[in-house]
Structures are given as structure tokens and as C-alpha cells.
Amino acid sequence: NNKMKKLILACGLSLICTSLFAQSNSATVIVKKIEGFSESGDAFSFKTTTGKRYQVYNAGGANSIQGEELISSSIKSKKAICLRLDADKTEPRLVQSVHKGKCK
């Protein structure tokens, strides 16, 4: 019976860990402005209302990420969008996809 308790505990903990981890790789933001393109033109960065900077790699528009247009619409509408971020923590964080509304 003690084994079962440990198993449940371990499982519960790992579940908590994954949800915490998943959360850290997404961010609910309101975009303030697009700051401009990288020198090579294959990425652009934008700033949020909280002053954080994020980067989108889109191969100069040839390979745009999912929901990229939501970034510019967030500037106009002042509505929150959800950024799914790359696991790499270097700043500015790299955005992998953008989704409507707040992150769930």
C-alpha cells in the first residue's frame, strides 16, 4: 500500500512539474510595437506593453510562424495574445507560434 502512495505522489509531482514547465514556455502579452527586422531580414522583434522583447524567426516572410498576423493585430486592438516560446531562455525569447487570447 505504501508503494501505491509513493507512486501517486511521484505522478502528482511530475504532473505539477510539466504544467509549470509548460507555463514557463508560453506568455500572455499585449504587443506594443514591432521594433524591426534583423540585419539579415529573416527575423523581427517586438516589444510588449510590459517592456519585454520577443523575437520571431520567419525566414524573411518565406516561412512565417503560426498566428504571426496576430502580433500586428494585437498592436491595433490592444488585445492579449498567447505566445508559445522556444525552450531556449536566451533573451529576446524566440516565439514559435502565436494564438488568440490569453494562454490557457
Image (cartoon, rainbow, N blue to C red):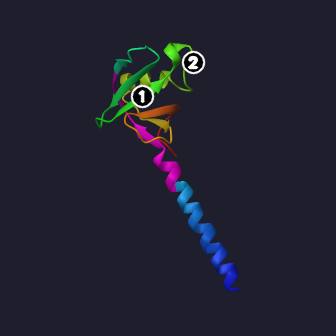
Residue in the image at 59% along x and 63% along y: 14
**As drawn, 21 above or below 33:** below
Q: In which quarter of the image is the N terminus?
A: bottom right
Is 63 in front, or is 38?
Answer: 38
Label 1: element kind:
strand
Residue closest to the eye, 98 or 62: 62
Q: Position of residue 13 (x, y in %)?
A: 56, 67
Q: Where is residue 98 in the image (x, y as percent from the top left)?
A: 51, 31
Q: Looking at the picture, which amino acid does disc 2 mark?
A: Asn
Residue at point 50%, 23% (across, down): 68
Mark 2 crowdedness (10 Å alpha carbons): few <14, some 14-19, many ≥20: few
Q: Where is residue 64 in the image (x, y as percent from the top left)?
A: 54, 20
Location of mark 1 (residue): 55
- Where disc 2 sits, the SS reads loop
Q: Which contiguous range is marked in magenta?
A: 20-34
Identity of the residue drawn at 28% across and 35% down: 51
Residues 77 and 22: in front is 22
Residue 23, magenta (yes or no): yes
Residue 79 sits in quarter: top left
Residue projecting furthest to the left: 51
Badge 1 density bin: few <14, some 14–19, many ≥20, Cα 10 Å: many
What's the mark number on residue 17?
none
Q: In this view, does 78 lie above or below 22?
A: above
**Residue 63, label in figure:** 2
Question: Which tag, 1 or 2, sits closer to the chain's start?
Answer: 1
Q: Distance between the residues labelled 1 and 2?
A: 14 Å
Magenta includes 16?
no
Which residue reaches farthest bottom? 1
Name the residue at 55% across, 25% down: 65
Amino acid on which disc 1 is placed: Gln
Residue 56, placed above or below residue 103: above
